[in-house]
Amino acid sequence: MLKGIINAKFFILSIVWQTDATLIDNPRFAVKNLSFEWLVGLRYTRAGKRSGRNGFISFISMISMFGIGLGVAALIIVLSVMNGFQKEVRDRMLSVIAHVEIFDATGAIPDWQQTAAEVQKNPAVLATAPYVDGQSMIIHDEVMRGVIIRGVLPELEPKVSEVADKMKSGHWQDLRSGEFNIILGSALAAGLRVQVGDKVTLAAPEGQMTPAGMVPRLKAYTVVGIFEAGHYEYDSGMAFMHVDDAQKFFRLASPSGLRVKIKDMLKAPLIALELSRSLSGDLLIRDWSQQNKNYFAAVKTEKTMMFIILTLIVAVAAFNLVSTLVMTVTDKQADIAILRTLGASPASIMKIFMIQGGITGLVGTGLGVLFGVLVAHNIDVIVPWIEHTMGVAFLPKELYFITTLPSDLRSADVLQISAIAVVLAFVATLYPSWRAARVKPAEALRYE
């Protein structure tokens, strides 16, 4: 049996490597370095085009390979863009909101300085700042809008958020106690048709009792700045004033709570849990992910569904290998029969065709990863070039605050996609390989 297997190896070398003079002249070198299953599998992968049938099989194999590559590249590019959008929106949110917020259920934290000192004991905390939150109506020239008022200390707020760096006009430091100044979001200012220096009127949620009955409390403020965070929710519905003025407007004895910045924003839920156990008093704590829970849940669901849909595209391309290998098995039945008569086992025959399909899957996956990574890394150059060439804008400035496609390529995504593509290609080889192993030599050679 061993002699028959050795003879089979030299038989295959003389048949399938006829175009390779080096291997013919020195077959023992090839046998020593590669088993005959690998040699035959590699030869079938690059099947010659001496006949129309072999050429067609080679063409189908190439289509399967490029199909896998295209699916892998599409999955890498789409996930990178979705990661980029998620990161961009998250960063714009965190330019206004804090990593962690600590507040009292009554609406006013009793002693914010003491609480801030306790929070600062946590090594993960970088800075804290007091704030006041409340809702109001803002009025200018018969235009009325709902607005969230946030009272801040101008000298401490830049340590916990980036809103001071988002000023479109005016100066952040013009928020001074007792001057009743206000800074508006860009979309809110545009809706009210106000600019820096204009006066706006705020209506407090609680009215004022007078002999004539309940009347609204109104207070005039001077617009000293306009900010643009790049997130419509904040740009269209948020305004900042000094924390002392906000306390007077909402009739609070102290700030509503503390805003906290930590070293790693991704650990905000863990830090919030640690603070809830270490702080004294009946305080409530929430992190940035809880404040926008619905949004991030929707993004996660969308990303998962896109991953599943595009993985199915990769699966379709991978399972095209089934038809390629089935045609190869049918075309090579005589070769299979000769191998079997020379001592090759069914396992060896099965391995040959698994190698053929596996190499196709690996090459296709490699091409897809290469193309996908290149596009994902250069999407900020490719998309503007396409827009300029075709004269279109994928993200018009009139409709979107994000005018360029962001990309955040993650190695974990690339590895996961590659592994899935290779596994699917390997699974697709099982049935054709099993069918090849079941070929009976006598029946295959009957009409040869």
Image (spheres, rainbow, N blue to C red):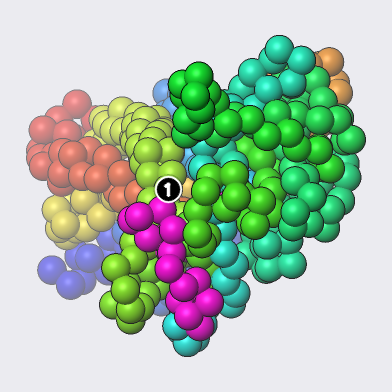
Name the residue rendered at 59%, 44% in the picture. Answer: 249
- For the point 57% across and 71% down, the residue is 128
Residue 372 visible to an observer of this rendering:
no
Q: Tell me residue 401's x, y (percent).
A: 70, 31
Identify the image quadrant of residue 416: bottom left
Residue 108: % across, % down: 44, 58
Is 122 located above or below residue 281 in the figure?
below
What residue does disc 1 label?
Answer: 291
Residue drawn where x is 14% and y is 53% of the image:
346
Q: Is residue 96 left or right of residue 439?
A: right
For this rendering, which residue is in front, 97 or 2? 97
On whether residue 36 falls in the magenta region, the answer is: no
Element marked by disc 1:
helix
Q: Is residue 305 visible?
A: yes
Q: Which residues are magenta?
A: 97-117
Position of 84 with respect to 295 (left or right) is right
Q: As rendered, which of 131 and 164 lies closer to the eye?
A: 131
Q: Nearer the viewer, residue 353 or 364?
A: 364
Report if residue 115 lies within the magenta region: yes
Q: Is residue 147 left or right of residue 433?
A: right
**Viewer-nearest residue: 448 or 31:** 31
Q: Position of residue 75 (x, y in %)?
A: 48, 39
Q: Position of residue 393 (x, y in %)?
A: 76, 20
